Amino acid sequence: MSEHHHDHLGDRLERAIGEHVDVERELAHAEREESDPSQRRRLMQTGVWLGVTGISLYLVAPSLLDVLASWRDVRRFEPLWLLAMLALQGASLACLWFLQRLALRPVALAPVITSQLAGNALAKIAPGGGALGAALQYRMLVQAGVAREKAVGGLTVVNLLTFAMVLALPVLALPTLLRGGVDQNLVEVALIGIAVFVVLAALGAVSLAGDGLLTWVGRTVQRIRNRLRRGAPQLTGLPARLLRERDRILATFGPRWKRALGSTVGRWAFDFGTLLAALASVSASPSPGLVLLAFCAAQVLAQIPLTPGGLGFVEAGLTGMLTLAGVSPGDAVLATFAYRLFSYWLPLPLGLVGALGHRRVIAKLDRPADPSAPPR
């Protein structure tokens, strides 16, 4: 019974990973849903998602409420640290915009920014919102003049690259546990984090430039998975699939793949910096390795489709991991609140800004050119 239960969970996990990277299928599904005249089916699907979300939020409500209640202690934050978190999260978004523009070229930056802000906000509030957010950004890009095939291919490749980094981070974070226990200076934590992201960039470059490392990773993961799940159908062809996806990334970015890789690493490095600034604001001195693992856990938990943006799961997991890293429970809750304030809650109103700004972008694109204007 237990083995069957573990196999069932393994199937769901593998299916969730496959669906997360298969943006093309999600966009096609969204278009079919829009063209489907049956409102009953949509209502049933929405009802199921709302039910799952409600149950999930109920289960994680204690941790979520503890984090949200910590807003009363916001006066403990120095304004300088709040500005630092805002700047770091802004830099993380800028890296993502640059990455998407590289994948969608030639396209102006404005529609990339407005569509990403709107789609990201929807993904954080709607049940099963990841697919809905991607579909909204896709529609806004097409509205701005991006070819449908280009929009689908670009968004898919960006999602592949960013999600690959999420999966690789925990593996690279494990060796940092050898650096010792708690009461470490946050400067040391930051330096170790920088080293991990530099190694991540180097390994990414090797994987994109040659077949050896990616083939080895595929074989190793495939062998471990098949040993752990002996009762499930054997996984085959993973190395070849990884190479195909790598070739797809290279075909999309071309000679700009190094800039794309740097933007992807920067997107997560600045996000990690936001968490470090949150810890610094409460004067925490945690274990470097466990802080990195806490960050990795937060990113993985954010992918759980049971609640929008992993709401509740991220708060519970991040608070627990930071406590394990040596941060006091009260400070862990407060640091989690600060980090999620900028990484989860701030993008919600920015989504409205993106939607309104997109209307102006479209109006400007539709405006006929002035024949008397000098050529640019």
Image: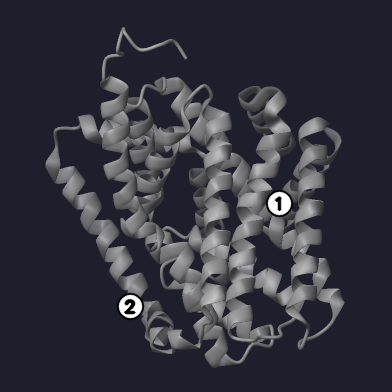
Q: Position of residue 311 (x, y in %)?
A: 41, 68
Q: Residue at x 81, y 70 (%)?
A: 176
Q: Residue at x 32, y 64 (%)?
A: 52
**Disc 1, SS:** helix
Give the residue at mark 1.
Answer: 226
Q: Position of residue 71 (x, y in %)?
A: 40, 83
Given residues 291 and 50, the one toward you in this image is 291
Q: Label 1 vs label 2: CA separation?
A: 35 Å
Say whether residue 93 is visible. yes
Q: Residue at x 31, y 72 (%)?
A: 55
Q: Position of residue 259 (x, y in %)?
A: 69, 36
Quarter where residue 228 is shown = bottom right
Quarter where residue 51 is shown = bottom left
Along the polypeptide, which appears first: circle 1 or circle 2?
Answer: 2
Q: Amino acid at mark 2?
A: Tyr
Q: Amino acid at mark 1?
A: Asn
In this rendering, the answer to whether 356 lies above or below 123 is above
Mark 1 Cα within 10 Å, few/some/many (few <14, many 20+)? some
What label does residue 301 carry, if any?
Answer: none
User: Which mark's residue is nearer the viewer, 1 or 2?
Assistant: 2
Do the residues bearing badges 1 and 2 touch, measured as CB atoms within 8 Å?
A: no
Q: Residue at x 86, y 36 (%)?
A: 212
Badge count: 2
Give the residue at mark 2.
Answer: 58
In this rendering, the answer to whether 153 lies above or below 284 is above
Q: Position of residue 342 (x, y in %)?
A: 47, 66
Given residues 144 and 1, the one toward you in this image is 144
